[in-house]
Amino acid sequence: MRVLGIETSCDETGIAIYDAKHGLMAHQLFSQVDLHKQYGGVVPELASRDHVRRILPLIQGCLEQADCDLASLDAVAYTAGPGLMGALLVGTAVGRSLAYALSIPAIGIHHMEAHLLAPLLEQDVPAFPFLALLVSGGHTQLVEVKSIGDYCLLGESVDDAAGEAFDKTAKLLGLPYPGGPAISALAEKGDSHRFRFPRPMTDRPGLDFSFSGLKTYALNTRNTEPDDEQTRADIARAFVDAVVDTFIIKCRRAMEQTGLNQLVVAGGVSANKQLRTGLEQLMQELQGEVFFPRPEFCTDNGAMIAYCGFLRLQNGQTEDLHFQARARWSMLDL
Ligand code: KG4
Ligand code: ZN
């Protein structure tokens, strides 16, 4: 089975071809970061328009890279949600029309499920059941993964997602969009001992998160301390330390609660160096194993959509012609 994957849920047009026998045959990405940078965040209307411009050339590029043609495709998988509605509609319309014209199945993929399964594209993969920490721009969730499609939500953010907190804090430190990589780099130059931010919601039981208070902490510190480069780096450091520590505390708790000792970390924030190091140390201490996607598959990409579509179709899932894109969509409804 050969599946074309299409991702257009936010500001990246990602296309890939996954084949049952050959694995990942091609993947290409166009990031709209430069387009949105001047506005300090994603402008949904501009994102949709740019997906329209990029999607067909990228599909063509993937077919050339994989050295195959449209007739060799067995199915089309596209991100059906959650995400920006206009952006989702581009991938949905192209994906479904292509499948219809080729008389092959189309399948709408849940973006967060695709993130969750992305580490399975690597050489070393976890066995079911395992624990997953999903950390992206829109979601922060701890999930018990029993099998493909059987997910139990253990905890999630009650306000800002981790990526959102990175982006907002970066903005108030004067860093460019997207803030995650920028704040992570600045934190490297910071001193961990100068400021200490709280580890939100770790002083009570449960596995939920809250990150919105951290940006207020960062803002207040910025307003009361001298405005110099070292202070900004120290604030970035205090922010990153607080986020990483919070994840370590909650992951430890989730492992104890479930008895699971394999942890998958996925979504844009899983590219974060400090988080990867922190969770690797935790899993070493707990004699467990941690799995990350390769950095380019942490953030949005077409490979995870093609692969998730392949797994779903292999499990016998299909969809009818009335399937709709969904801006909001809980993974528990899968
Ligand atoms: O998964 P993703 O590409 O898109 C969503 O599904 O939301 O995640 C994007 C988020 C952004 O908030 C971005 O700032 C964050 O991931 N991010 C990072 C890093 N790279 C991307 N956050 C922290 N450190 C990074 N290295
Ligand atoms: Zn994503």
Image (cartoon, helix red, strand yellow):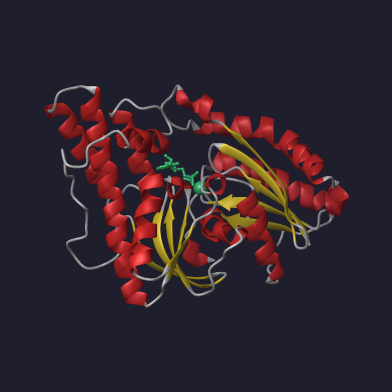
Q: Residue furthest left?
A: 224
Image position, residue 66 (x, y; %):
79, 46
Could you say which quadrant of the image residue 323 lies in? bottom right
Q: Is 167 positioned to the left or the right of 172 in the image? A: right
Image position, residue 158 (x, y; %):
30, 55
* Quadrant of the frame with the C terminus: bottom right
Q: Is 289 positioned to the left or the right of 85 in the image? A: left
Can residue 175 be spotted in the picture?
yes
Residue 76 vertical placement versus 60 (above, below):
below
Could you say which quadrant of the image residue 91 lies in? top right
Image position, residue 230 (x, y; %):
23, 27
Residue at the (39%, 34%) spot, across then down: 179
Compare residues 30 and 271 and report the one nearer the observer. Answer: 271
Q: How many marks?
A: 0
Compare residues 33 and 184 and report the one nearer the observer. Answer: 184
Q: Is 228 positioned to the left or the right of 115 in the image? A: left
Residue at the (44%, 48%) spot, across then down: 136
* Quadrant of the frame with the N terminus: bottom right
Q: Residue furthest bottom?
A: 259
Image position, residue 255 (x, y; %):
35, 71
Could you say which quadrant of the image residue 117 lies in? bottom right
Compare residues 219 and 20 and report the one nearer the observer. Answer: 20
Residue at the (27%, 36%) spot, across then down: 236
Residue at the (56%, 31%) spot, across then down: 32
Can residue 325 be spotted in the picture?
no
Compare residues 323 and 33 and report the one nearer the observer. Answer: 33
Give ligand 1's quarter of the image: top left
